[in-house]
Amino acid sequence: MGATTGHDPAAAVQVGGTIRYWAAAKSEAGLAEEPYLAATLAEALAEAKERHADRPKLVRLLGHCSYLVDGSPVGGRDHTTVALSEGGTIEVLPPFAGG
């Protein structure tokens, strides 16, 4: 086995933080925020989808949202490569009409 680097998401340690839901995501989740325990954005979203499996509209909506991690836009980056920080925040921004 080769050495791992600090940039390998597969080797990352899970950290705790907060997911904040906005607008339609907040309505579908039935809450404004909740904790996560994950190493990457992909893991945190998978955890949220599992936790809210009884809310299929939210699960679908999460696939169309934009995300900010600690205030920085994720954009088109692969969610498996977006590392999370201890005490960090994931902002879930559903598509907005109008702009």
Image (cartoon, helix red, strand yellow):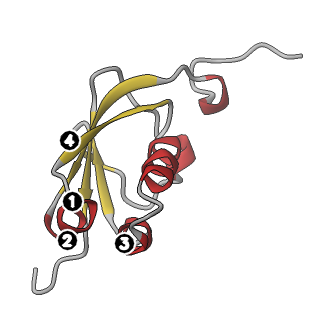
Please tell me which of labels 4 and 2 falls first in the chain.
2
* Disc 3 target residue: 61
Please tell me which of labels 3 and 1 falls first in the chain.
1
Please tell me which of labels 2 and 1 falls first in the chain.
2
For marks 3 and 1, give the CA distance.
13 Å
Q: Kindly identify which numbered label has been placed on residue 30.
A: 1
Residue 84, how many percent across, how many down?
40, 31
Residues at marks 3 and 2 touching, judged by CB atoms closer than 8 Å: yes
Indicate the amino acid at tag 4: Gly
Mark 1, secondary structure of its residue:
loop
Q: Residue at x 24, y 65 (%)?
A: 25
Please tell me which of labels 3 and 4 falls first in the chain.
3
Residues at marks 3 and 4 touching, judged by CB atoms closer than 8 Å: no
Please tell me which of labels 3 and 2 falls first in the chain.
2
> Which residue is situated farthest in the front direction here?
54
* Disc 2 target residue: 24
Q: Residue at x 35, y 68 (%)?
A: 58
Residues at marks 4 and 2 touching, judged by CB atoms closer than 8 Å: no
Along the line of sight, the residue nearer the viewer: 12 or 62: 62
Q: Kindly identify which numbered label has been placed on residue 71.
A: 4
Label 3 or label 4, whichever lies nearer to me, is 3
